[in-house]
Image: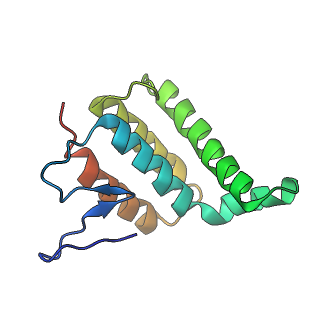
Amino acid sequence: MENINSGGKQCDIYGVNICDPDLKITPEMARDAIVRCFIIAHCEQLDDLKNYGDVSEEEFKKIKHMEVEILIKNIFKETGGDFNIPTKESIMNMLNKLAEYAKNFRNQAIVEKHYSEIMLLVDKIKI
């Protein structure tokens, strides 16, 4: 997932190239990157969902995405934000709560790594 530019800076943050000076980073882009990050970080737990039915690989990818999206929608709601109309502030609030949630399942160093990667993206959101 890591795309490093010639200066040694990580450019690809879960599908968003933060090194592109012409790209206007939006809250929606950050939200979608968080969904992709969470799917990657919790792949093993999500793969357990395969045990609940006979589905194709494509259907299973959709199920994993939907599972994570529902979780993130709920955390947006709990923190007073709106998944469909995210703001930089609502993303920050959701991200902080999501990091606390993730610490129940992942090593704290891994959570902090993903959090700091996402923060590279969030810091570039133009309001």
> From the image, which quarter does the N terminus lie in?
bottom left
> From the image, which quarter does the C terminus lie in?
top left
Q: Position of residue 93 (x, y in %)?
A: 37, 34
- Depth check: give the residue in front, 76 or 108: 76
**Is 103 on the left-hand or right-hand side of 26?**
right
- In the figure, 1 relative to 100: above or below? below
- In the figure, 7 relative to 37: above or below? below
Q: Position of residue 60 (x, y in %)?
A: 72, 55
Disc count in the image? 0
**Is 62 on the left-hand or right-hand side of 75?**
right
Q: How is the image coloured?
A: rainbow
Q: Residue at x 18, y 60 (%)?
A: 19
- In the figure, 96 relative to 6: above or below? above
**Is 23 on the left-hand or right-hand side of 97?**
left
Q: Position of residue 63 (x, y in %)?
A: 70, 48
Q: Position of residue 28 (x, y in %)?
A: 37, 36
- Depth check: give the residue in front, 23 or 123: 23
Q: Residue at x 31, y 63 (%)?
A: 12
Q: Residue at x 24, y 74 (%)?
A: 4
